[in-house]
Each structure stands twice: as structure tokens, then as C-alpha cells.
Image (cartoon, grey):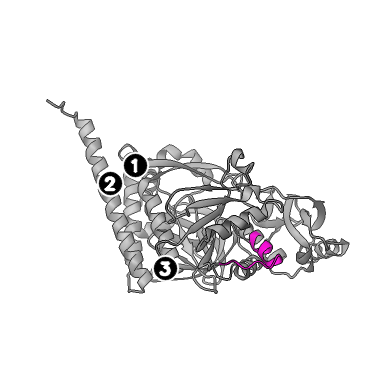
Amino acid sequence: MRKALDPAAWTRRISKIRSETRTTKRLGEVQALLDQWRRGDPVDFLAYRDTKLAEILAYAQKHCPYYAGLFANRGLSSRNQTGFAKLPLLDKPTIRQHRAGLVSNELGSMRHGRMNTGGSTGEPLEFIVCRGVGLVDSLHQEFLYRKAGYEPGDVIVALDGSSVPESLRAQHVYWIATGPEDVPYGRLSYSSLYLTPETMPYYIEHIIATRPAFLRGYPSFLSQLADFLLEHKITLPFAVKAVELTSENTYEAQVTRIAAAFKTQVIFQYGHSEVCVFAYTDDDTYEYTCSPLYGLTEVLDTEGHPVAPGDAGEIVATGFHNFAMPFIRFRTGDVAVFSGDDNGIVRLKRIVGRTQDYIYTKRGDRLALTALIFGQHYRAFNHIVKWQLYQTVPGEVTVRIVKGTRFSTADEDEIRSKFWDIAEVAVHFEFLDAIPLTRSGKFMFLVQKISD
């Protein structure tokens, strides 16, 4: 005779069944709504967003001690969403300090895993996600591909910071297979960690042999490939349906070169490992649409108040699907220009960088890179292979440069003069053969060592 389960075991089993049922139901709901959205069918996204916000608030209040305390201390109830804006913003130090209280007391009945993020910003963070979150992200990635023309059989490849074994690199193989499926992240990953002028031809040759319909990855990586194609007048012997740029800030010059080299549309995808926001562009305005099926996106000023359309603020997001460790009003550290909120769909005119993407003047004022660099025309750009700003002292910046063949003292003078005229920032130069990437293979344009 089979031994009877004790009451505690029965409780865990029932909780697990409920958890799996809830996940299946939510995934089916998200899939159906994404299909309607892609077809252009009318959907009441505002009602959906309000419902899911109420659900995650109620769950967090009931199952996460940290949130239960917040609601109790402020006399709020998850049943009344007007109190949502009174909840404090959640940042990484708070997550580290209250990690145990942020985790659901139902974690034992959930399929879950651990994730890490923040290596490129110097603020690493480990957190827990439940199984349903990854699947919701996959559904959104497929939704974006299909909007761009994806059909079964199309090859998708990633261009990221994957690590490739030395035994393969010895054979001039700088990519790894990631699985048989193209959706959501590609069947193989090309690594930015080993890209040099000497290895570039091997990358290009393999991409031509693979014939991907979609390339998805770091803008800095793809722009280097694009530069090589354009410089050597190489036309790909196949059609690319789209290049999707993600994980790094993207600049106008990069987009222009990538579109020209791959002869295709360029789309942006914005999100975080913290699984609170999924945003994308789908036309040449490059305005971001934030999925109301994924989470609630706010754009707030330095006082925590919503900004008006046309104004810039920090992206603050609440995820709808991570019941293992809910992040409510999470500070992403990214700055965006708010475009509006229509039918529950938040749009961002552009994402202008991270909150630390500022140069500090001698007086201690913060100057956004968009004003100093990206809103200016520098002739020196034509003579620079790659450059990076490094700041440790207010009013001074070290400009690290990989020179092009035509770089001259006139280019140094131009950069020095503009930095001083715009912000009274003194420039020091450091000339390198290569600029190091982060551990994950990303390129950081600004390394800012000054904190507020």
C-alpha cells in the first residue's frame, strides 16, 4: 500500500498544482492577446494592465513579507490601486537589503531559477524568477519577429558576449550553437569577445554561409560588422528581414550603417533581466512601444512624479509575471523621453541612456551625453575607429581612442575645444589599440566613476 502523504506534503503538492495551472492560464492569455495585437484586432489593454497590476499587488501583499510591511505601514490595501503611487521605488540596494522579504513564501511550490544582472554597471544583483517569466519573454520575442516578417524556417542568430572554448577559437571558430530552435534567441551565438580586424573575415564568412533572416544583438558588435561590409563593398547574397538591436544604447550613426550594410530594417528591443519591461520599435520613427502584457512602465522625474509627454525621466517598471520575487516600481536606471500612455500602452519617444550617462562639470553639474556628444557634429568621428569616455574627476574626462589612419592633432583639438566650449570640461587623451569590453562582451561608451 502506498504511504499516505502527511498534511504538509499535501499542501505543497496542491500549491504546486495551483502554481502550474496559474502559469499555463497566464501564458495562454498572453499568447492570445499578442496574436490579436499583431493582427490589429481591438484589445482593451488598459483593462488587462489594471487587472494584472491588481493581481501582482495582491499576491505580493499576501506572500512577500517586505510588501506586506509596506502596505501595512502606509495603511494601504492592494485592493485599492490609488495607493500604488505611494509605494516607494525599489532600487538595487533595497533589493539586497530586503532580499529574503521580497521572495514569495510559496517559492517551494514553484518552478524557479536564479538570475544575475548588472555586471556592466558595476552593480551586480542576483534574484529569483519563476518559470512563467521566461516563457512570457519568449512569447514577446516571437511576437516581435513575426511583426518583422518571421516565418517558420527562418534562421535567427545572436551576436552577444557568449564565451567560446579555446579549442574552437584555435580553429578560428568564434561562435557556439545554442540549440535547434531559432525562436526566441537564435540557434547560434557569435561572440563579441573575440572580434578583431584579424578575426573579422571568419565572422563574415560564417554569417554568409549561415544565411540568417534575423540578426539580434549588441549595436556595437553589429556596427563593426556593418563597417567591414561597407568598407570592403560586400553585398550579402541573401535577404535579411531585420536586424534587432538590444542590450546597449544605440546611436543614430550605428543604425544608419547597419541598415545600409545589411539592406534591411533595424528594430530596437529594450528589456531587462529583472523581467519588468519589454519594449520594441517597429518603424523608422524608432519610438518604443512598452508591452502592457508584460508589465507597467512609468517614467518619473527625480522627485518620483510622472513626467509630461515630451519630457525625460527614469524608467520605473512593475513586472506582472514573476511571482517568485515580485519587483514593484523597480528603478531601471534608464532615462527615456515619455511620449504618452494610450489604452494602457506606454510609448517612449526614445531611450537616451542610463542615469549614470552624464559627465560631471567642474561645478558638479551633470551634463547628459546627448548634449555633449550625440547632439553635436564632430568631424573627428570620421577618423576614429572606436572611442570611450572615462571620468574620475569632475570637470575632467579621459578620452580613450582607437585611431583611424587619418586621425590627427586637428581631431584632438576639435574634441578638446567642443568639450570645453559646451561644458568647460578638460580633455585628456589616451590612445589604445583596442578598448576592453565588459565581462559580458558589451561595449560601454562611458565609464563613470563619479557617483552623486
Please say whether residue 100 is visible from this viewpoint.
Answer: yes
Q: Which one is nearer the viewer's eye here, 309 or 173?
A: 173
**90 part of magenta stretch:** no
Q: CA distance from mark 2 to mark 3?
A: 28 Å
Q: Which one is nearer the viewer's eye here, 14 or 172?
A: 172
* Circle 2: residue type: Glu
Q: Which mark is residue 341?
A: none
**226 part of magenta stretch:** yes
Q: CA distance from mark 2 to mark 1?
A: 8 Å
449 w.r.t. 231: above or below:
above
Q: Residues within 10 Å of mark 2 (few under 14, many from 20)?
A: some
Q: Which residue is mark 3?
A: 345
Q: Which residue is mark 1?
A: 111
Q: Which residues are magenta?
A: 225-237
Q: Which residue is mark 2?
A: 20
Q: Which one is nearer the viewer's eye here, 108 or 50?
A: 108
